[in-house]
Image (cartoon, coloured by chain):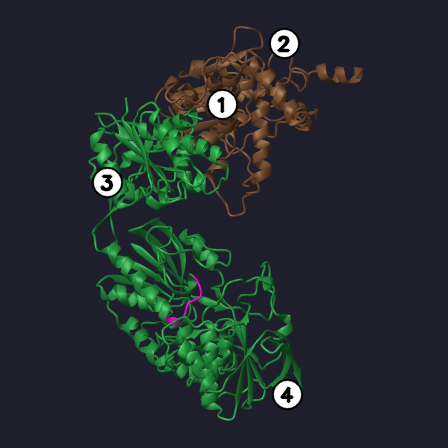
Chain colours: A green, B brown
Amino acid sequence: MSRIGVFVCHCGENISRTVDVEKVAEAARGLLGVAHACDYKYMCSDPGQALLKKAVAEHRLDGVVVAACSPRMHEKTFRKATEQAGLNPFLCEMANIREHCSWVHEDRDEATAKAIDIVHMLVERVKRNRKLQPISVPVTKTSLVIGGGIAGIQAALDIADAGHRVVLVEREPSIGGHMAQLSETFPTLDCSQCIMTPKMVDVANHPNITLHTYSEVEEVDGYIGNFQVKIRKKARSVDMARCTGCGVCMAKCPQKKIPNSFDRDLGMRPAIYVPFPQAVPNVPVIDRVNCTWFKSGKCGVCQKVCGPGAVDYAQQDEFVVEQVGAIVVATGFNLYDISEKPKGSPIKGYGEFGHGKIPDVIDGMTFERLASASGPTGGKILRPSDGREPKQVVFVQCVGSRAREKGISYCSKICCMYTAKHTMLYKHKVHDGQAYVFFMDARTPGKGYDEFWRRSIEQEEAVYIRGMVSRLYQKGDKIVVMGSDIAVGIQVEIEADLVVLATAVQPRQGAELLAQKLGISYDQYNFYSEAHAKLRPVECATAGIYLAGACQGPKDIPDTVSQASAAAAKVMTLFAKDQLEREPIVAKVNERFCVGCFACKKVCAYGAIEEKEIRDRQGNLVKVVAYVNPGVCGGCGTCQATCPSKSVELDGYTDEQILAMIETL
Amino acid sequence: MTQGQQTESTPLVDPACYAAATAAIRAEAVRLLEAGEVTAVVGYRAGRRAGSAMPEVATTAEAAAQLIFTPGCQNNLALFLSKAKREALPKGKVAVVVKGCDLRALAGLIGESQLKRDEVHVIGVACPGVYGAGADLAKPLAAESLARKCRECKVHLPEGTDVVAGTLPPLPDLAPLEAEELARLEAMTPQERWAFWTEQFARCIRCLACRQVCPFCFCTQCLCDRNRPQAVDTSPRPAGNTAWHIVRAMHLAGRCAGCAECERVCPMDIPLNLLNRKMAQELFELYGFETTMQPQEQGALTSYRDGDDQSFIK
């Protein structure tokens, strides 16, 4: 006969509000095999846990059921307490009477009856639990960092400085990301390039960092501590080992009129190019779509002029496989391109703003390039249409963001601050110019942020108009901005020379595809989901994968760098031990009954199932059966559901346990 | 109607085609055994009653010379090659005589790692059809005595075998009775259909002949024989009977070769193949999956593709 203890938690009022916890404890006392049952206000607190430990000793318990919250919340807590009480931790199970009961029901009597049923099921399950020992798996102390913007760079440098190898994968030909495109940064107005480029160089020179630029993650297999990652190195058409970065190829390329996306298409670049002069690595790439050689098979100038013979038109995509123990995802963001309505998306676009049609209606990043010393205008604020200096500039905030009716309800977080910065940069460069800002409200929570915003109004004379813009249209060489000033309650029209839209921050295009490769979750906008909004903000629910930067949600540079360092710290914690202890909830094969059809092997998402030969004493092959590698098994139970003879079972979730649970109902 | 009945009872095909297949099987079997290429040939020999046939494991050239192929060759001999029943055969490479439907079962067994293709020499036979259950074996094969599965057979001529015995005579077009019966059941309300199957399963005596004759029931420990935990009541009572047949249908989904042996051997005449055809039809409609005469790497229910229909998840 089992001696099980049932511990019913009130969770403050979370459970006891709807469930009669005393009645649940009372009912539990009457169950066969239950030796002790009690209730307490906060079972997870120190006195609560003490209650559990004391009861284990006093009543000589051989199993524990904690009727409280989801096992995702506190299973670890109570298993630890059970272990401290001298029992095997896997003899403790959670009966979830909060998320599965009190939170979702209103009727007290019915909820109480359900809570009793849940407790009864778990009692039957715990009766059949086995003592399990943790499984140790080796940890590969190399980290993959996906994305070479400031988030990826910071995480990579931190992990590399701690002495671990880092594989940094960047999709573009150079690392740097969006921060390399910025002019000056809020709230201190220090030059982005000046603080960014040294970090980029550090990455390139760091002995612990392997950099793969112009590369993408193709496949991810494995699990925490032991991932295998296949990386596609796209054909650069230039041999990285030979190129000296002299730049002659770029100078001699006859095809020079290709809009440079780094400069938001304001500047031009040749077909063989580096995106910007401070690129890391300083090795050009051939844009095969626009290169004359790849279009017509003629030209070949770059190859002829290249001294070291680095230009290689025949180069193919290469694949590299890296073994890593942890993955930091830092894929960053895109600015919402409002000029067209994205296909198959609930987001509606802003046709009425004429973005993409009126040349002097630009977005915030384009203004950054105009203001940047290394930008297409050399840092002069000039209109894209006629190159004239604009004397009246209208900034429009919350374009896309916080617009439920347009499909995005979140705040993009950075726009209030960068618009304030833009008005300052503009005033510094065009002294007789006037900046207007249409805003809903200014959000400036951050160190020195509100002071910065006030400075833009009080010292730099930006005029802030609280209200929305309804329409933009061209009138002569001016753009008419129609909007409202709700502080005064009037409609306003401003004839502007340039309009800058603070468009919403969105996740990278294709973010969901990478998430599917990694097996991590994402929200309705495709931002990656953290494991817990407050307590685990940098971890994914998938063990061993961490998030940094705007791929998780809109973020400014300080927040991004903080999160990147936090993710790096998590990786270092993982790498601090040689062996990783993991839950022993894994599948086991009954070799006697396994007939080796390997349906389990076909469905196993973790590749944990191997073929094992059973031989007799003479060494003759008797049969081939399935074998589950416990280090690789994810404990999902798909094999158990698939096995026709039920010869493979997941510890803690055996058919016997599940059927015993069902039979209580 | 009268005309129809006349057509039904006239011989279906020229019996000479069976004789030709018999001759070819004998020649190949004798050759294989004399050359020592195989240790045994699994085929058919004449049964005691006129027109009947039974499985034969021929290990000598003399025995091989007695092998036959007639409309009485109903058994699916792939059964002998499943791991569980392999013990009936001598060690080493064996040859097996298969009709098209049996070949699908053999391919399925290979796909499920029960044997390797190079462990078996496959003698395919061009099969115009075999007798159905309850047919008068003394009379020549006619449309009315033809097995229901053969009326809508798409695999009269095996493909991918080491040799094909016989040639296929022209075959008449016959009404697809099985498909018609399926459509009739489909047209019922769920309550009517449930009543139909409840009545069918109520007759089941749990002799488990369906399991014993099925090439895919190769588990050494059947889930339904377990008593701890007991998944299915083992005594022949309605609830356990229904559970048993549903478990079998689910386990055969995407695997069943359509040999209909379960239906033929059922002493209570439960139309078991209808269940299996229904599952096959569902898998074809949902995933475009069909069992074939070639081994397949992935089964319908052991693979996942991005485009798979997921509308059933609500």
Q: Chain of mark 1?
A: B
The answer to whether mark 1 and mark 3 are in CB contact below 8 A is: no
Judge whether residue A555 is colored magenta: yes
What whole-number distance in Å separates the C-alpha atoms at marks 3 and 4? 77 Å
> Disc count in the image?
4
Which amino acid type corresponds to the residue marked 2 in the rendered image? Answer: Asp
| Residues at discs 2 and 4 both on one chain | no
- The residue lying toward the viewer, choosing from A488 and A393, is A488
Q: How many neighbours does mark 2 have within 10 angstroms: few (below 14), some (14-19), or many (20 or more)?
A: some
Q: Is residue A622 above or below residue A498?
A: above
The residue sitting at 48% across, 60% down in the picture is: A510
**Residue B284 at what x, y percent from top left?**
58, 36
**Circle 4: element type:** loop
Near-viewer residue (A277 or A363): A363
Please name the residue that numbered disc 1 is placed on: B97
- Tell me: A157 left or right of B215: left
- Quarter of the figure with residue A243: bottom left
The label nearer to you, 3 versus 2, is 3
In the image, residue A175 above or below residue B311:
below
The chain carrying label 2 is B
Give the mark nearer the N terminus: 1 vs 2.
1
Q: Which residue is mark 3?
A: A50
Amino acid at dot 3: Ala
Chain of the residue that carries numbered disc 4 in the rendered image: A
What stretch of residues is rendered in magenta?
A553-557
**Residue type beneath disc 1:** Val
Of badges 1 and 2, nearer the viewer stands 2
